[in-house]
Amino acid sequence: MPRYDYFCPGNGRTVEARHGMSETLHTWGQLCELSGLQPGDTPLDAPVERRLNAPLPITGRGRGETGARSDEPCGPACCCFRE
């Protein structure tokens, strides 16, 4: 299942949640229930905003014979490249 980041403007927290692509969370209460968090002082009906996650690069470079990723960057056009 994909992972999504949700931001709650009411408490300034960003929380990662896993759910199906067709599902969207709208409130802090939904996010807490799905992720197992205690809501704290934030109202359960406080709105949350889904944030975009940067995709992980999928390339053949930087992989050994076992297919495990190494710490080498993919190249200058990739988000994992550091100068």
Image (spheres, rainbow, N blue to C red):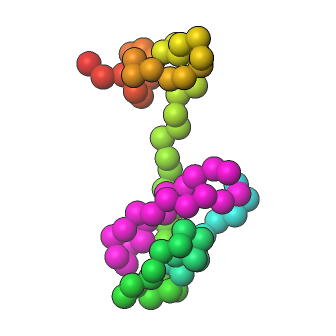
Is residue 75 on the magenta stretch?
A: no
Instruction: Report x, y in % for residue 23.
Output: 69, 63
Q: Nearer the viewer, residue 27 or 36?
A: 36
Judge whether 58 appears above or below 36 on screen. Answer: above
Judge whether 73 appears above or below 26 on screen. Answer: above
Q: Which residues are magenta?
A: 1-20
Instruction: Report x, y in % for residue 78.
Output: 44, 23
Residue found farthest to the left: 83
Residue found farthest to the front: 66
Quarter in which the C terminus is drawn: top left
Quarter holding residue 72: top left
Residue for point 58% across, 77% down: 33
Residue for point 40% across, 63% down: 14
Instruction: Report x, y in % for residue 3.
Output: 57, 52
Residue for point 37% across, 78% down: 10
Q: Across the whole image, how many numbered discs are drawn on residues?
A: 0
Residue for point 54% across, 68% down: 35
Residue 73 visible in image: no
Judge whether 74 appears above or below 52 on screen. Answer: above
Q: Main secondary structure of the magenta part?
A: strand
Residue 48 visible in image: yes
With 53 as the anchor, is 65 left or right in this view? Answer: right
With 83 as the anchor, is 64 left or right in this view? Answer: right
